[in-house]
Amino acid sequence: MARRTLAVLAAVLAVAASGVLLHEREPAPAVRVPEAAGATYPGLYVDPNGAAAVHVRALERAGRRAEAAILRRIADRPAATWFTDAAPGYADRARQLVTAATAAGRLPVLTLYYIPNRDCGSHSRGGAANLPAYRSWVAALAAAIRGHRALVILEPDAVAQAVRGGCLSPRATAQRYAVLSAAVTVLAALPGVSVYLDAGNPTWIPAARMAPALRRSGVGRARGFALNVANFETTADNLRYGTQLSRLLGGRRHFVVDTSRNGNGPAQRGAGDRHWCNPPGRRLGVPPTLRTGHPLADAYLWVKRPGESDGACGGGAPPAGQWYPAYARALAG
């Protein structure tokens, strides 16, 4: 049965990516979960196996309780779980995550980050070897989370880098939009799953250029789009940009904002990649919540997991995605 489901999902992805016109449908209703007793807002899931939580437990075992208390400002708050490769068991990891979240009455956030030619060969280079491999990977994850509620952030930077140009040929750009659209189709068809296609940040691509690319990438079948993933732009600037972008998309697309590290706004420009790659002086932003008070903003999320490196930049920083204790302490301090 599982193999048949995967085959069907992969076939849907292949058909959609081939350029066949798909009828758009209304997005799923806004995500809502029951409030836990005593909670002031619906609960997002805290992964007990996140790098911050593991590090805090190690500090407590070592008797470094003051340091552990600081890092609990990260470890005890919900953050997205990233899926970045096809290592054995990746689908099982997704299934275990959503199953645990459902059992806890909480909502998990998953970030899918495996597009071919990921990050245009920069710090987070990698991704699927080819488009068929990517379609199969998405199909496997869709099968793994079927039957559970979840928020899915789809492919940070993928659309923005295609719009900016410089690393994809015109043909590869069109293929990227098509395979993203196909992924949206499969994931958004899952009951209880809300998909947000990444749309960069307010300082990267003007909204007038981003909107057509999002349309080609299937945003009309998604709940909406995600902003500021792994970036530092202020929440206010993201709300303005998101509202403008939604208006260009017909006024019906909602969005989420990554507030994980924007508490002190962006670093000053002019320092090369240090503007965005582990810049000093940044702070944690607004804690994750599904209640933003904004009619189009569905959530403030910690999509980038605070304390995980942006890349091996600035001297002493580990590769992208690895736990960086010194930077975590600076963010939470």
Image: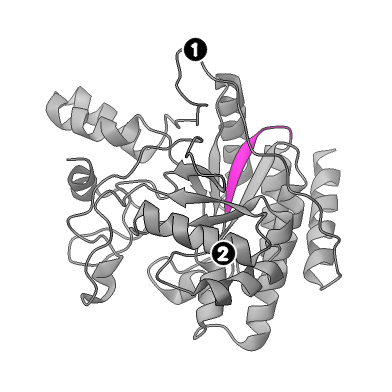
Work out whether residue 29 or residue 307 is closer to the camera in this orientation and state it.
29
Residue 276, x across and y down, in percent: 31, 65
The residue lying toward the viewer, choosing from 209 and 96, is 209
Q: Is residue 135 visible?
A: no
Q: Does residue 177 appear left or right of residue 80 in this picture? A: right
Q: Quick one: SS at disc 2?
A: helix
Give the answer, above or below, for where 169 lies relative to 102: below
Q: Is residue 150 magenta?
A: yes
Residue at 21 percent of width and 69 percent of height: 268
What residue did someone put label 1 on? 37
Three-letter code, disc 2: Leu
Looking at the rendered image, the quarter that the N terminus falls into is top right
The location of residue 8, given as percent across then percent down, is 85, 51
Horizontal placement of 108 versus 12: left or right?
A: left
Which residue shows up at 86% across the image and 69% down it?
Answer: 21
In three-dimensional space, the C-alpha distance between marks 2 and 1, rounded to whole angstroms, equals 36 Å
Q: Quadrant of the C terminus?
A: top left
Which disc is residue 245 wearing? 2
Kind of residue at disc 1: Ala
Give the left or right position of residue 71, taking residue 40 as reference: left
Question: Which region shows up in magenta?
Answer: 147-153
Label 1 neighbour load within 10 Å: few <14, some 14-19, many 20+: few
The image position of residue 216, as x and y in percent, is: 70, 71
**Circle on res. 6:** none
Q: Residues within 10 Å of mark 2 (few under 14, many from 20)?
A: many
Say which element carries label 1: loop
Q: How is the image coloured?
A: one colour
Residue 192 placed where, x, y %? 70, 36
